[in-house]
Amino acid sequence: MASNLLNKRAAFLGAGKMGGILLRAMLEKGLLSPSNTTATVQHEEKARELSQKFGVSVSTANLAAVKGADIIFVCVKPQVVADVMQQIRPNLNSNQIVISVAASVSTRQIEEAVKHEIPVIRAMPNTPCVLGVGMTAFCKGKYASAQHLETASALFSAVGRTVVVDEKHMDAVTGLSASGPAYIYIILESLAEAGVKVGLPRDIATLLAAQTALGASTVVLETGDHPALLKDAVTTPAGCTIDGILELEEGKLRVTLIKAVVKATQRAKELAEG
Ligand SMILES: NC(=O)c1ccc[n+]([C@@H]2O[C@H](COP(=O)([O-])OP(=O)(O)OC[C@H]3O[C@@H](n4cnc5c(N)ncnc54)[C@H](OP(=O)(O)O)[C@@H]3O)[C@@H](O)[C@H]2O)c1
């Protein structure tokens, strides 16, 4: 699949933070070739800067960028998606795939905006895709097939793990794994601050916190064991960890994290409703 993709022409509409991360990662992984890839942004000066940075053609012309493209990534802000889809409509056909990463924009809204029976994949990646350790969930629209899902899977697998979900779960994915890196960074920052409080140099405290989070995440992913069981294995009776856990419980860490994901999911739903 990866070598087939190299011959595909790709257009990234909106090469900002997420579009830029995906564009750069897919080029670096050799999934897409620079000569077959174009991108767009809103501002001319940004286009010039990114063209040099990524070594691909970058312009502000969405309609021209999608002409002849096999895969069209829509990476603009949710409120701009409808406008951009209307702009590119004349150069779209049903042999292309539209992959949108816009939060809260449904496959149906995109299908209606383009007025073509075009395969649409809605994807929700996260920023760790930049180092190939991202998490992307996706679902397919009315005209997309299992093969289109496979193409999306091949593209996003190059930048991390992937999972296919029902479209009704996409707002929850946004609240958990797309917003999630921000929550984890706050937890890491706090653990590092705690290390400093108990006398560790900041760089060592940050290393200890980040590698511990990576280690614990890797164990959950590799063993498939329930996190509660793994936590019990660290918690020696009358030891140190249980005292730390009691503080976390008193500070309502669990309920706070649950509420954060619920709120972010609700916000994604609100954005969807306009
Ligand atoms: N950031 C995340 O963690 C994350 C995670 C998952 C999904 N997403 C989704 O990714 C999308 C982009 O978010 P972002 O954080 O990457 O935002 P961003 O950094 O602001 O990027 C938006 C990009 O769109 C460009 N743009 C604006 N209007 C345009 C137009 N009419 N035609 C072409 N390009 C246009 C902007 O150009 P200029 O640079 O010239 O202004 C900018 O490069 C959103 O829909 C968001 O829901 C983001």
Image (tube, rainbow, N blue to C red):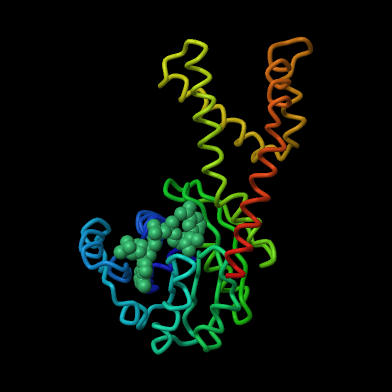
* Residue 265 visible from this viewpoint: yes
Foreground: 92 or 102? 102
Vertical comparison of 5 with 185: above or below: below
Q: Position of residue 227 (x, y in %)?
A: 72, 34
Give the image quarter of residue 66. Answer: bottom left
Answer left or right for 25 relative to 106.
left
Residue 89, position in %: x, y? 43, 86
Tell how many labels.
0
Residue 171: percent from left, percent from top: 63, 60
Q: Where on the image, by quarter, is ligand 1?
A: bottom left
Q: Quadrant of the C terminus?
A: bottom right
Residue drawn 43% across the image and 73% down it: 72
Q: Residue at x 71, y 31 (%)?
A: 252
Q: Residue at x 38, y 71 (%)?
A: 10
Q: Is 177 situated above or below 254?
A: below
Does residue 84 sit above or below 184 in this rendering? below
**Whether residue 15 is visible:** no
Instruction: Where is residue 218? Give x, y as percent.
Output: 60, 36
Kindly indicate the quadrant of the structure image that contains residue 35.
bottom left
Is residue 79 toward the left or the right of residue 108 in the image?
Answer: left
Left or right: where does residue 92 sit relative to residue 113? left
User: Residue at point 64% right, 45% down?
Assistant: 260
